[in-house]
Amino acid sequence: MSVSSIGMENTGRRVFSGGVWEERYGYARAVVAGDRVIVSGCTATVEGEVRHLGDAYEQALTAIDIALTAVATGGLTRDDVVMVRYYVVEQRHFDPVGRAIRDVFRDVRPACTGVRVAGLVDPRMLVEIEIEALRA
């Protein structure tokens, strides 16, 4: 199953993907706030399983795909993305994650911040990505 085929539900101001962490920790995948879609941190977790173990680039692409699916469910597109924030657990993951962001957003060129953190909720996760989109 591709990530983009995962059903997301738009309840008006909230987007839900049915992901295990959303239910467990009580948050929405994204919030629609006026002309903005603010997407919670996304990892490479699909159907409750972390994908692409050990591969920060592929995990980043999967996380971005999940985030962009939420953006689309909220009514915006990749071209509306204005901010990407990413968190990596190892210094060596900055470059592969940065390449994934470049490969997806090459012509959009959103603002971007990368941060190294001590760890994520599951130790198999190498990267977590947040996205904000704004209707121009």
Image: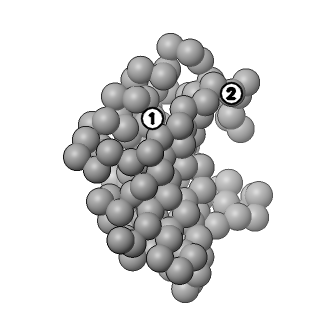
Depth check: give the residue in front, 67 or 1.
Answer: 67
User: What is the x, y in percent for residue 12?
Assistant: 55, 86
Residue type of the residue flagged with mark 2: Val
| Relative to 104, residue 127 above or below | above
Q: Residue at x 75, y 58 (%)?
A: 24
Residue type of the residue flagged with mark 1: Gln
For residue 117, the mark is 2
Q: How is the image coloured?
A: one colour
Question: Farthest residue in the right direction?
Answer: 25
| Relative to 17, residue 105 above or below | above
Q: Nearer the viewer, mark 1 or mark 2?
A: 2
Question: Farthest residue in the bottom direction?
Answer: 12
Q: Is residue 57 visible?
A: no
Which secondary structure, mark 1? helix
Q: Quadrant of residue 19?
A: bottom right
Q: Residue at x 37, y 38 (%)?
A: 101
User: What is the x, y in percent for residue 66?
Assistant: 44, 54
Q: Residue at x 44, y 36 (%)?
A: 60
Which secondary structure, mark 2? loop
Depth check: give the residue in front, 20 or 73.
Answer: 73
